[in-house]
């Protein structure tokens, strides 16, 4: 159902000829039909942030957006002033069709870094997408398809609140690391909410979801998460419920990204228990999630706990206090490491399921946190070494 | 020539039956025949440091070592008190043969984490190695072979100072990251030097060599670099020359590790120019060296500067101040990125040489630093996913 699950939104996805793959849907248009046009956004912290990020960050700063244009087939990153002018021209074209100011339209791009877009194709794509705007399932689905790059499937979410709805779509497969997990994401709601409440919900939601997945440790230049509210349900949600639903929407989309990580054969959940603080737990989880050796071992179905501990051991004591001789590790429920040493035999661990669970018990405190990653496979190298740009 | 290039040292390498590979040389013995027994060491900072590291760190603390026993075929890491007792027993056996205290013998191990060694094989190996000690080329060469694991070739160094010599050997191929690059290393000299001067030379030398290579971002539990001085040349070296030679020995061995990185098809030099400080330059270099996406691109012979910039952009401004629009990047001498945007065409870059040079100009200051890494290949995944332990 994607972004059109919430009332008050229409969307379209068209083949604009931006992608090198002929006929691929590569331009999405999402329009908020109101009555509200409240919006919030979070963006990559990469210093080489792309032109569309620079544009959209400014556009959403006042808490209002009427529409978003998203394209695959080119990131428009590291393209300087000409790139910025392309994002601006794209917003201008969409704004003209909608009869709003340019600053009411956000722009998102994804694809190869360092090349300008074929702007004429983008602009004519905006026109065809505008003509095809649809508030039903098809419009949302086409939009979700149009933002895919190496994604093997569209990623969408649809959640029901108490009298209102949240829908969303995301793309992301490679170049996924906190902060953010590399992606373009649009979440919509028909609840009546203020831009301030939306920004708070989105920042809190992304911090425990998109910021806790890491497929390959590589931060993108284009990450954008936008939350748009139409108010079309007429319902003012309970703030706690709304925050929770936004977090759930982010969590579902983030989980789908991990499930579609480039070349991945396993999704790996890493939960750190018994840490002295959330920062400590996250530092430990991220150290393990970043280990190429561990990720290779998982792709070979080996629950190699030595590679878990050697990664964990790189976290400075000042960041995560724990006693190495008190650390236990379960992989898929089997305690293969006990007290920092050998536990049950690794042959007892069933590594065949797609999802692998790693539970690390620091036995140092009361806090826990979970991060997600993928295994490192031949296919990942193939996708990223032998690709055709 | 390895460790026996310096006068006053004998060495041996034997097949002790520790490695799973029948007949592989897997135990090395290096003996300092004096007259001096001065020594210095640097060790992994991993909190799960292996039993032999715990033993050897204590053994070298007083600045004196008579010998080192090194084995491949098992890391004796995360093996608790029984593992520590194995290292101690190994030192005890060697010390008995040499007629010195146990604390005069360092022990190093490399191989799989989390399993005890076949101690009877280690101890009988110490005996055969002792019987075969040789101060000529063969002894040094056998020792260098005996410490190899996934290394495809032995790595040694031989340097002449003014009247004295420095020799050395190292193993290391995977699990290579600062600090240290994962390895076992023994450097010998026949110069007359004090333990304090040796520790200073070794710490300074490793910091700009072994601590600046990163094949896979994974820190080991067993890294050990030992420097032993026999004084057999009778020459007291010029301190600056000695420091410089130790650094050169480390640099040569570190470069050989990069050249033999697991599955690597390219050695990648990353030099950051125009940084505001050495820390800034190193942070930038390491961010690029850690990028799986960039390393995959290089393995596919693509000088993908977008992946260089997106990694560079993750370094916080507080760590490395620079203006993203003033950054230039040369790959193999071709300026493919100019002012943070597209420069010359990537097709101009010849990516066929084994060594790939990346020069990043931050244009923010006067400092430069170089780090080394390897590309990420199918073969790396194969070695680390489909291995037989």
Image (cartoon, coloured by chain):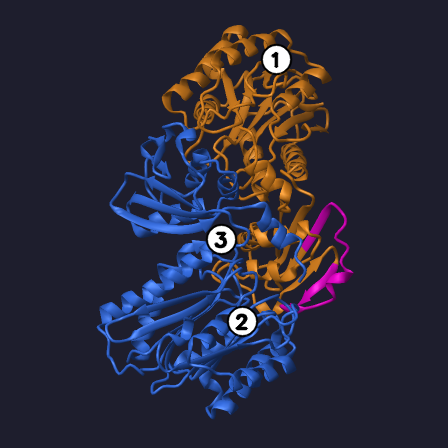
Chain colours: A orange, B blue
Q: Are marks 3 and 2 in contact (CB under 8 Å)?
A: no
Residue B316 visible at all:
yes
Q: Chain of mark 2?
A: B
Few, some or many residues within 10 Å of mark 3 (<14, 14–19, 20+): many
**Residue A84: percent from left, percent from top:** 41, 21
Few, some or many residues within 10 Å of mark 1 (<14, 14–19, 20+): some
Residue wearing tag 3: B215
Q: Is residue A179 magenta?
A: no
Stretch of the chain drawn in magenta: A334-358
A22 and A180: which is toward the camera: A22
Snapshot quadrant of residue A167: top right
Q: Helix, strand or loop at disc 3?
A: loop
Q: CA distance from mark 1 to mark 2?
A: 72 Å
**Residue B269: percent from left, percent from top:** 39, 48
Q: Chain of mark 3?
A: B
- Residue B179 to residue A27: above or below: below
């Amino acid at each position: 159902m994607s972004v059109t699950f919430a009332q008050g939104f229409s969307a379209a996805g068209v083949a604009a000829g931006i992608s090198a793959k002929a006929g691929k849907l590569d331009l999405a248009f999402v329009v908020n039909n109101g009555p509200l046009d409240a919006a919030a956004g979070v963006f990559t912290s990469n210093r080489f942030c792309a032109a569309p990020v620079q544009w959209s960050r400014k556009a959403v700063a006042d808490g209002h957006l009427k529409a978003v244009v998203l394209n695959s087939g080119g990131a428009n990153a590291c393209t300087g002033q000409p790139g910025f002018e392309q994002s601006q021209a794209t917003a201008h074209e969409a704004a003209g069709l909608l009869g709003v100011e340019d600053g009411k339209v956000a722009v998102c791009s994804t694809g190869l870094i360092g090349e300008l877009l074929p702007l004429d194709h983008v602009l004519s794509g905006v026109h065809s997408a505008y003509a095809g705007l649809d508030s039903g399932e098809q419009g949302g689905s086409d939009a979700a398809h149009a933002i895919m790059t190496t994604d093997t499937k569209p990623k969408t979410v649809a959640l029901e609140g108490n009298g209102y709805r949240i829908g969303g779509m995301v793309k992301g497969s490679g170049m996924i690391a906190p902060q953010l997990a590399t992606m373009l994401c649009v979440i919509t709601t028909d609840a009546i909410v203020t831009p301030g409440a939306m920004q708070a919900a989105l920042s809190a939601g992304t911090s425990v979801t998109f910021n806790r997945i890491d497929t390959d440790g590589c931060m993108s230049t284009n990450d954008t998460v936008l939350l748009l509210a139409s108010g079309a349900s007429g319902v003012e949600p309970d703030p706690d419920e709304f925050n929770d639903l936004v977090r759930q929407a982010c969590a579902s989309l983030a989980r789908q990204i991990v499930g579609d990580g480039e070349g991945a054969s396993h999704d790996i959940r890493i939960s750190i228990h018994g840490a002295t603080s959330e920062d400590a737990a996250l530092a430990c989880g991220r150290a393990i999630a970043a280990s190429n050796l561990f990720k290779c071992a998982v792709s070979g179905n080996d629950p190699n706990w030595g590679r878990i501990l050697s990664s964990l051991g790189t976290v400075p004591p000042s960041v995560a206090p724990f006693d190495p001789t008190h650390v236990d590790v379960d992989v898929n429920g089997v305690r293969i490491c006990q007290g920092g040493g050998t536990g049950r035999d690794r042959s007892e661990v069933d590594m065949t399921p797609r999802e692998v669970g790693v539970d690390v018990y620091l036995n140092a405190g009361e806090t826990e946190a979970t991060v997600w990653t993928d295994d490192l496979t031949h296919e990942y190298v193939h996708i990223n070494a032998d690709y055709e740009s």
